Amino acid sequence: MSKPVLPAAFLSGVLLVLCFPKFSVSLLAWVALIPLLVAIRNVSSGREAWWAGFVTGLVFFGVTLTWMNYVAVVGWLFLSLLESVFLGFFALLVYDARRFRSPVLRSFIVALAWSLIEFFRSEVPVFGFGSNILAYSQAGNDWIRQAASLAGAYGLSFLIAWVNACLFETVIARRFTASLLLALAIFLGLGGYGYAQMRETTSPAGILRVSLIQGNIPQSVKWETMARDKIIEIHLALSKLANFSGTDLIIWPEAAFPGYFNRDAQASQLVEFVREHQVPLLFGSPHLEGVSEAYNSAYLMTLDGELKQRYDKQYLVPFGEYVPLQPFLGFLKPIAYSMGVSNFIAGTEPTIFRLHNDELHFSTLICFEDLFPGLARLRADQGAQFLAVMTNDAWFGPTAAPYQHLQASIFRAVENGVPVVRAANTGVSAFISKRGKVLGSVHDAAGNDTFIGGHATVAIVLDAQETLFRKGGWLFPYLAALLLAIISAMRKPGNGSYPLRALLLALPIMAVYGCIRMQAGASAWHQGSEDQSPHAHSIGFDTNDIVQRDVLEVD
């Protein structure tokens, strides 16, 4: 491998790192892939191309996933290496595209390959992990992120990668006219569409005042028996403060109740609170069926203190909430359980929660479930007027993880045209409009929104609308796979390579998987509205010192 190759691949990794929290220089996303494309242009074999992509991935994921060190160093190493392997295959596909003479076609293949590889690394069973999708770098750009309503985050990543490839062809390969004009057309088209979407106004279907509770319970004491009373007390105290502002729904984070709610005598405290204050409560708690069947669940308690509905988390965290592939990895169970890995069972279906005499419908996503576009889409298609994300990001310390997680929720809102509210044990607990605009969050006087306790109340506009993404734009990755296979098959016999054979093998697998997802879909229509309500009002209350002192004293 020639000397300029590795530095160029390394540079792409650095630029990608700078695109995401906590740096968030979103403009760099439009040029971050160019050094990698230069490296691939200079290699002499597919093997060298693969290593160039792997190096880029190793820098990118090795840095942006450092928060995994707070959970397990082995997990950080494994996940960084796994995600880097996917970028190696991206580079291999780009290397294979060098055979085509048309710069426009080459740039198109680069974009298809990038979006397809992102889809694979995000959706592959068991090990899929959709963090830091290239499109997520634009989460803070009001206009650009609106493209996700057309073909989702994968579609926007396709366009960003296409601009990168066009600029590469323009500057490096010196194909000025067509490639440069195409890059400008894509960028201006995205801006124009986003501008129109942000200015669009319709009549709201209603307004709901939602309160988010952020308990900021240290992970070290969250499951300590002696801390249980104090944890419940903290959440109830914050809920009472939130209720003073006038609220229609209070939401606690994932596993906020420190025990099995359906088997715990302390559950009566929540029932008493709801009956006394006459406000519905959505909260997270483990749920125990029989002797050993445990679920990571979300409960909705109505005004009479009754538990009307429950959602059991469908996508569990591998090696965090269960040991995957037990026919092969079952021997790891004793070791995993001794290290604190849970033994949850996955839920089988989404739950559409109902409020206000069945007039208001919403659904929940627990923890990293908001990284999977299909889960959110299915809930919106089944009639959810907003989505509630319940999570606990205290695991990851003072890192960029909560902000990376927030980006995913922003895109789930834009893709599906529904508001999203996030309740986290520690940041970022936020309210997101259907256009992906953060309307408010739990924060202290200094603006800190992680590792502080408090509450916030905001009136969200119930103006869900069916986006093109929900109507069929979610199929874009499958179309990308089909187009790549067709383009590869256009070559003369004997001019193929192993990327072509790999694609032709992957296509039927993706087709079957796509059909399964299509069968799970449903359709619903909701009238849209303007991005914000003039009646929105937020209140924050910082309880960090109280929370830390009281809980640690119990410990």
Image: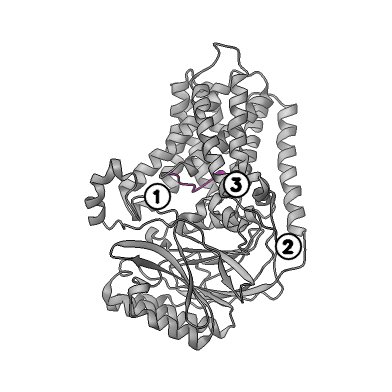
Residue 516 image point, x, y percent: 53, 43
Name the N-terminal-most of marks 2 and 3: 3
Residue 209 image point, x, y percent: 61, 76
Please say whether residue 4 is visible from this viewpoint: no
Q: Vertically, is 10 above or below 333?
A: above
Residue occupying the point 48% across, 32% down: 9
Apparent side of residue 44 relative to residue 525 in the rendered image (left or right) = left
The quarter of the image holding the N terminus is top left
Name the N-terminal-most of marks 2 and 1: 1
Residue 347 image point, x, y percent: 43, 57
* Magenta region, residue range: 128-135
Residue under numbered circle 1: 66
Kind of residue at disc 1: Thr
SS of the residue at dot 2?
A: loop
Residue under numbered circle 2: 527
Q: Label 1: few (<14), some or many (≥20) within 10 Å?
A: some
Residue occupying the point 37% across, 57% down: 345
